[in-house]
Amino acid sequence: MQWVPPSILPLIYTVHFYPQQLFRSSRYWSHFTLHGLRIHVSVRTMMRWRELPRVASLPIAVGERVFTRWAFRELLERGTAKILNPDPSHVGGVFETRFIAAMAEMHDAGVAPHCPLGAIALAACLPLDAIVPNFVFQEHVTLGQGYLKELFIPVDGYLPIPDRPGLGVELDNDAIFRPQAPLHPEDGTVVDG
């Protein structure tokens, strides 16, 4: 186990919990100093869990499976979430994500853009992160290895905002068109990606 400095607040990420498990777990996690509880569920499921924010003493983060500003509005109005995870690639782009962030700000909620699709999507999120006053954190899965000419390089724990036109990144076409490993291995295992 690796030591985590006190300046870093962990975020508990949950997948496929039943409500009762989540309620019990949130009580357990509330004894620790955590950034929040991130729930990977559909908006319909989240709407049924109206009592979760009252039971959990941690901020609830939700939204990677929410696709419209109206669904986010409903989550905010019901008090279901204190951190929204809109994915600019799914909700309609950076501009629509900015609308969602403004709505969250009016409800005293934070925004942590969901970004599982790679460094191009990350390039779209970073300028948004810089202008959203209620920005909390930015997740990412890659810094551009294998398809960007220049990788994102963290500086003092932060990713710099691209300063070139457009998304600010340049694709490495040679790397992109190189043969890749098959996504369907012959042994029948499932590859995530």
Image (tube, grey):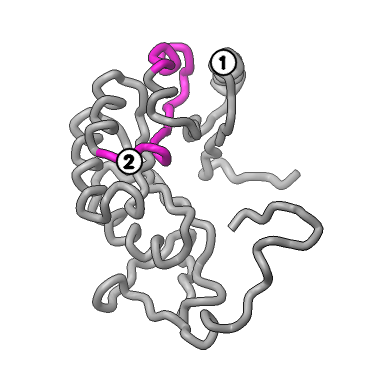
Nearer to us in this view, 63 or 183: 183
Residue at the spot of label 2: 67
Q: Nearer the viewer, mark 1 or mark 2?
A: 2
Q: Residue at x 43, y 53 (%)?
A: 115
Amino acid type, mark 1: Arg
Nearer to us in this view, 52 or 110: 52
Say which quadrant the N terminus sits in.
Answer: top right
**Magenta-drawn stretch contains 49:** yes
**Helix, strand or loop at mark 1:** helix
- The chief SS type of the magenta part is loop
Q: Is residue 37 above or below residue 1?
A: above
Give neighbour class at mark 2: few <14, some 14-19, many 20+ (Cα, 10 Å). Answer: some
What's drawn in magenta, residue-wise? 48-68
Say which quadrant the C terminus sits in.
Answer: bottom right
Q: Residue at x 60, y 19 (%)?
A: 25
User: Along the horizontal axis of the image, is 170 left or right of 189?
Assistant: left
Amino acid type, mark 2: Phe
Q: Residue at x 48, y 66 (%)?
A: 154
Give neighbour class at mark 1: few <14, some 14-19, many 20+ (Cα, 10 Å). Answer: some
User: Along the horizontal axis of the image, is 182 left or right of 89?
Assistant: right
- Residue 48 locus on image (x, y percent): 41, 16
Q: CA distance from mark 1 to mark 2?
A: 29 Å
* Image quadrant in which you'd find residue 111: top left
**Helix, strand or loop at mark 2:** loop
Residue at the spot of label 1: 27
Q: Residue at x 35, y 54 (%)?
A: 89
